[in-house]
Each structure stands twice: as C-alpha cells, then as structure tokens.
Amino acid sequence: MTRKHLIAAIVLSMAAPSLEAQKFEGLAPTPPMGWNSWNKFACDVDEALIRETARAMVSSGMKEAGYQYVNIDDCWHGERDERGFIQPHPERFPSGMKALADYVHSLGLKLGIYSDAGWKTCGGRPGSRGREFQDAATYAEWGIDYLKYDWCDTEGLAARGAYLTMRDALFAAGRPIVLSICEWGDNDPWQWGAEIGHLWRTTGDIYPCWDCEHDHGTWSSWGVLRILDMQDGLRGHAGPEHWNDPDMMEVGNGMSASEDRAHFSLWAMLAAPLIAGNDLRTMSAETRAILTHEEVIAVDQDPLGIQGFKYRDHGDVEIWFKPLAGEDWAMLVLNRGEEPAGVTFDWSHEEVADDLSDRSASFHRGRVFELRDLWAQASLGTTRRPLEATVPPHDVLMLRLDRLAGEGGRDGSEG
Ligand code: GLA
C-alpha cells in the first residue's frame, strides 16, 4: 500500500461511521412525557426555574405518573466562544449546563434543550447552522437527553437534509438523545421524520384557547380544536419511536377546567407526546389532577402506540376511538359546542373498526365490554345496553372499554 493509499484508507474509515449514522432507537417506544418552558415562560428561563420545575415534577407526583423530561426551550443561550462552542447565558445559567443536567439526573429525571437548524433561533439566539456536529458534541458532553430542533431562519435549507444532519451529528456524538423535529408541519415531516427523529410537530404553535386563531401579524397560533382538526389524515404515520406532535400542552395556562380536561384527553387519544407547558411550581390541585390522571395517561401510553381516530362527526359532537392492547378500546365523546349535548350510542348497531391496525371492536357481533368513565372513575355498565350520556359544553366523556373475557370471540363469531 502506498502512502497515498494509506491516507485514503484512513480517511475512508474515519468517514465510515457517519455513513452508518442512524437515529437512536429505543428512546420513545411510547410518546415522550415531560415539561417544556416555552408555553408559560417564553424567553424568561434560568437555572433556578429549571431546578424548581424538576423538583416540582417529583413532588407533584408527575414523575411517578410517567413524566421524565425537563426541557429548556429557546433563549438559554449565551454567545459562542472563540472556538465556536456555544455557551449558556452567563447570568441565567451561571452554574453551566453540565451541573444542571447532573442535578436533574440526580432526581431521576432527564434534561432537554433547544436549538434551531438555521443561523438564529426563533428568539434570535445562535442557531446550529454549520455547527451541528460541534453543538451535538457539546450537548452530549453536558449530559443532555432531548433536543427540540426548530426551523426559524432556514431560508434555502431543505428540511429533511437539515434534520438528517442533526440526527447524524447526535449519533456521532454518541449519547442517546431524543430528537424532536419542530418545523411546524411545513415540509410534511410525517413523510420523512420516522428515520430521523422521535417526534415531529404537525402544526404551528398552540395557544391556550378552545377554538381561536391568535394572530401574531406574520403568523398565527392556534387553539386546541384548531390543532385537533389539523391532525386529520396523519395517524397512519405515527407509531412506536416516531410520533405526531400536535404541540406542547396548555393545560393549566388559562383555559377552563373542562377545556383543560378535554385538551388532555384529546392528546391522549392522539397518542401525542405529553409535554406539560404550565408552571409546575404553582399549579392548582385541579391542574395537577388532570396532568397526573393515571388512566388517561395509560390511554396515551398504551403499548400498541396506535393513534386514535374520529369515528363519527355530528358537528359539535364527535366520537373518537383508539385501539388499546389486549383488545381493549378507548372512546371519547367531544362536545365542541356551547350547549350540553345528549348522546345515545347503541353498541349493537355500531361497527367500530380500524383498517389501519386491522382491529374491530365487534360490538355488533356480540362482543361485550365493560365501560369505565375515566374522569368520573366510575363504571358505566357494559356495552349490552346503549350508552346514554350528557356531555357538558367544551368537555369530553372519556371511556375505557375493557373486553369481558369469554364474551364474543376473537373474530366476534362466538359468544
Ligand atoms: C417556535 C416553536 C415554539 C417555540 C418557539 C421558541 O415558534 O414552534 O414551540 O420553540 O419557536 O422561540
């Protein structure tokens, strides 16, 4: 081998790992759960807030309910140093990110951070463009566990390639880090996101209102129902390790209790990431009870990872179903309107089936389920009798349907 060939071989072998780069698997078998600073605090973040929030995540019972990521959104940044390494803001994060990660880890939680594929973040802080590998290595060294990667100031960039670069950079850095793709659904991330990230935003930003558009001049943010309606047609793209992300939650940020409950229930039916966006340190008992509701979380976190679907649309009233493991189902009746809505659902006449997962509830063929009202935590009998209920305005009825053993066959032909 000549010297020239040797150098070529070394260069090729150094390049090889990046050719094999891939997304870290095993980080999001069910939708990620955590908290993010943006919805409530915007750019007003510092290390005291993050430490206090991590402590509140434990003391409120959220950790026990399954939440684990404490995610710092935009504006944690200081400047790059003379070698180009990004620094946290010296006054807001004086102890540095490694110390913060160590602290969050000491509570059994994980730390997330935020960057942007462009030159600048949406808040005007340094983006990762041209510094992807350097930034990923920095995050890995700090002990970061989750990266939300935004899409401001990216003119001329191709989204898939830009996110692929950060995926490869994270892989090269060697620390398993969840990659949250945040380009607002502009470039159909559901078409290419599964091999790159663990979740992708499907829409523009959420706003804490039931059904409004909040106009910011050049862009809008959206109420819960607006975001819900934008999920139409996307469920086939999501599943374990790759989730549709209808944005972080606004529970506890000013809507009514029933609207918060409906929002949380809908996100669970969508198998959405459950990223709280309120002040965990001061939340009310009511907000805490919503965010930590074990049985609703279990619908979101069901191991099948099948996103729910709208079964019937009566205008203001919608009926949704979600297949669950063990042949169970979740059902949700949504009242979008301003008046109480009476609902009758005669199971024996309904053919609830999901072509995507090839599952059928088979009520019409005699399969019987026990009905549990998840918010009331009460039994509502079985599917042998029609369901009759009144759903208050801006609220939901959410049920779990537990299949009764021996009642109706696997294919619905017995029993
Ligand atoms: C974008 C994102 C938000 C938030 C802000 C931060 O708008 O969609 O979720 O991260 O940027 O500036």
Image (cartoon, rainbow, N blue to C red):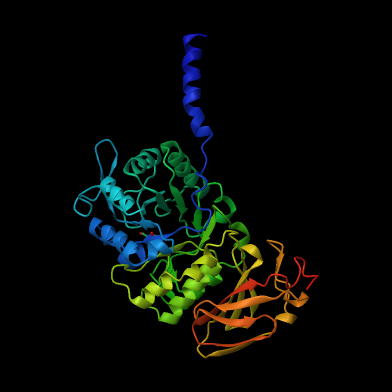
The vertical placement of 359 against 4, above or below, is: below
Q: Relative to 242, is 111 on the left or the right?
A: left
Q: Nearer the viewer, residue 370 or 205?
A: 370
The answer to whether any part of residue 366 appears in the image is: yes
The x, y position of residue 389, in whole percent, is: 59, 87
Name which quarter of the figure residue 43 lies in. bottom left
Q: Relative to 175, is 309 on the left or the right?
A: right
The vertical placement of 119 against 285, above or below, is: above
The outermost residue toward the front is: 406
Which residue is depicted at the point 49% across and 33% down?
Answer: 18
The x, y position of residue 135, in whole percent, is: 36, 42
The vertical placement of 98 against 259, above or below, is: above
The x, y position of residue 119, in whole percent, is: 36, 48
Ligand 1 visible in quadrant: bottom left
Which residue is depicted at the point 23% across and 51% down?
Answer: 89
The x, y position of residue 210, in whole percent, is: 45, 78
Name which quarter of the figure residue 383 lies in. bottom right
